Image (spheres, rainbow, N blue to C red):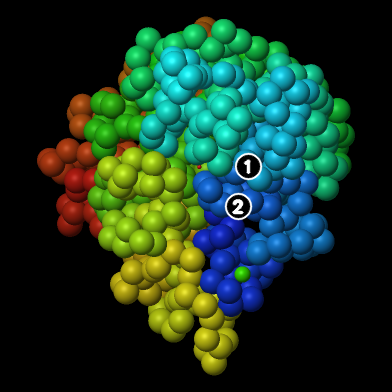
Amino acid sequence: MADNNPWWADAVVYQVYPRSFADSNGDGIGDLDGLTSRLPYLSELGVDALWLTPFYPSPLADGGYDVSDYRDVDPRLGTLAGFDALVARAREHGMRVIVDLVPNHCSSAHPLFQAALAAGPGSQEREMFIFRPGRGPGGDLPPNNWPSNFGGSAWTRVPDGQWYLHLFDAGQPDWNWRDPRVPRMFEDIIRFWLDRGVAGLRVDVAHGIFKDPELADAADTVRSVRPSGYYHRPETLELYRSWRAILDSYPADVWPGPRTAIGEVWYDTYATLQPYLAPDVLPQVFNFELVTAQWDALAIRKGIDATLALTTGSRAPWVIGNHDVVRPVTRWGVAPARAAALLLLALPGSAYVYQGEELGLPEVLDIPDSARQDPAFRRTGGKVRGRDGCRVPLPWERGGASFGFSGTDPASSPAPPWLPQPAYWGAYSVAAERGDPLSFLRLYQAALRLRGENPALGVGELSGGAAGGAAGGAAGGAAAPAGEGAIRWLDAPDDALVFARDPGFVFAANLGSRPLPLPPHREVLLASGALAPDGALPRDTAVWLAT
Ligand code: GLC
Ligand code: CA
C-alpha cells in the first residue's frame, strides 16, 4: 500500500496484561521474559504492535496502576535489560511496543508521596499531591464529596489530620499537575521510554489529571464520566499539546517510526470526546463504542456512525474488550463475539485486541472471594465483583500445571498462578485451538492475515461514498471523497450490519433471528460460523465478502 499513513493508522495492537500472559520462572506471575519467549505466537497471530499494561515496580494495590517507580521494571516481572531485549526481539518480528503511562496518580509507596507524608502540612513536598484539611468539627469529614472510582470517598486522612485526594484506591494518590515539578518529571519519564525505543504510550485516565483548583463539591456523588471538577478539564488539552511536541520531536523515518500516544478517555457524550480529537493533541484516543454497545445492530451502527462522523478509526481505534471490562464472549455470547471480531477487524483504521480475546476466553465469574485482587471488590465490600475475571492467566497447553502458563517443562512444579484458573481452561488453550479449524484462534489468525493482504481493509482506499445511504452517491466524482474512514452502508434489515469498503469488500453480520441472504459477491473470504445450506447468513454470524 503506497501511503503516507503512520504505522499506527491501521495497526492491530495486542494488549498484554504482563502478569497474566506467560511466566518464565515458575513463580506463578507472568513476566517480561515469558512474554519475550512467546513473541513467535504473537507474530504467527499477525498483530502489528503490543501494548503492555504497567510492569513497573508497584505494591499492586491496583494491578500495577499504582506505580512506585516510573523508570524501572518490577523485579517480579523482570529488569530494564529484559525490557530492552523484549523491544529488540519484537522488532525482529516487525512488532512495535507501546507502554502504559500513568500520569493521574502514583503509588502511595512512591518516594515523593512518602516524602510528602514525612514533610507534613504546608510543605513543598505536599504541594506535589492534593492535600487539604477536612471539613466539619475537627476536620473529620473529607474536603469534598468526590467519589473514588473503586467505591467510597476519594479522600483518605493521614495521621496529622490532612486528607489526600485519590480518584482510585487509597494506594493511588493523585498528582497535583498545577505544581510545575509534576509536568517536568513526566516529560522526563516520557522521554525515558521513547528513548528506549517504545513506539507509543497508552495514557491512563487521560480524561482525569487536572482537578478544579476550588475542589468544589460535585452535583452528586454518583460515579460518572461526565465533565466535572475532576474529569475533562480544559487544562488537560494544553498538557497534551506539550506531549505531542515531544512525540513529534522523534524522527519519523527510523524505526519505530512516528511515535503515538493513545488516550484512555471515557466520555459521556460525543461532545465530551471531541476536543481530544483536535489535530495537535494526542495522536489517538480509544473509542469505546463497541465496548459499551449491546449486541444490537442499531446500537452498534449508531456507535460506528457517530465515531466516523467525529473522526477516523485511525485517530479513535476500535476495541471490543480490555482488562477493565467483562470479556466479549460473556457480555454478548460466543457466536456474537466471533462475529464482533470480524466487525472489529473490518472497520476502518486501527483495532486493539486484548489478550485472550483471540482464544474466546470467557470471563471467569467464580473466582473465590479470597483470591480476588481488584480494589473495587474490597472497597465496595464485595458489591462490585471487580475485574479479576478478565485477567486470569492464559492457558497455553491442554493440561499440566497452570495449563502451560508457567514454563513448558512438564517435570517442573511451578507455583500456582496468581489468580486461579478454572478447571475447563485447557479447552481454550493455544495448543487446543491451534489444531481446531473452528476455533477462535484460527478465526483471528485468518482475519489478521486477510486484513494484511486486502487493500480495502485497515485504512483502506479512499472511498467514493459517504457513511450512510445505500450504495454510495458519489458516482462520477461530483461529490468529494469521504476520505479515509468511509464505509458505505448497504440496504439491509434493521437487525443486520452490512457495509462496503473499496475496493471490492463487503462486511455483513446478521444480528436478527431470520436468515439473511448474502449480498452479491464473488467469494466468501471468511465467515465467523457456518452458513445455512442455502448460503444465507444465520443469526449472530458475520462474513467478509469479496465483490
Ligand atoms: C485505568 C486502567 C484501570 C485502572 C485505572 C486506574 O482505567 O485501565 O485498570 O484501574 O485506570 O489507574
Ligand atoms: Ca514469573
Q: In terms of depth relative to the viewer, which is nearer, 92 or 58?
A: 58
Q: Can you say which quadrant of the picture contains the C terminus?
A: top left
Other-residue count near label 1 (Cα within 10 Å), few / some / many at <14 / 14–19 / ≥20: many
Amino acid type indicated by mark 2 = Pro
Q: In terms of depth relative to the viewer, which is nearer, 417 or 481?
A: 417
Which mark is on residue 254? none
Q: Residue at x 49, y 50 (%)?
A: 354
Q: Residue at x 68, y 23 (%)?
A: 121
Q: Which residue is mark 2?
A: 59
Q: Is 352 on the left-hand or right-hand side of 539? A: right
Which mark is on residue 107? 1
Residue 6 visible in the picture: no
Query: Mark 2 or mark 1, which has the lower sequence index?
Result: 2
Amino acid type indicated by mark 1 = Ser
Specify whether tag 2 is near ligand 1 (CB below 8 Å). no
Which residue is most to the front? 138
| Displayed quadrant of residue 545 | top left
Q: Is residue 296 above or below residue 271?
A: below
Q: Is residue 460 above or below residue 233?
A: below
Circle 1 SS class:
loop
Q: Is residue 513 above or below residue 144?
A: below
| CB contact under 8 Å: marks 2 and 1 | yes
In the rendered image, residue 171, in percent from the top left (x then y), is placed at 56, 41
Q: Is residue 125 above or below residue 408?
A: above
In the rendered image, residue 318, in percent from the top left (x then y), is placed at 48, 35
Q: Can you say which quadrant of the picture contains the N terminus?
A: top right
Other-residue count near label 2 (Cα within 10 Å), few / some / many at <14 / 14–19 / ≥20: some
Residue 265 visible in the picture: yes
In the rendered image, residue 204, in percent from the top left (x then y), is placed at 59, 34
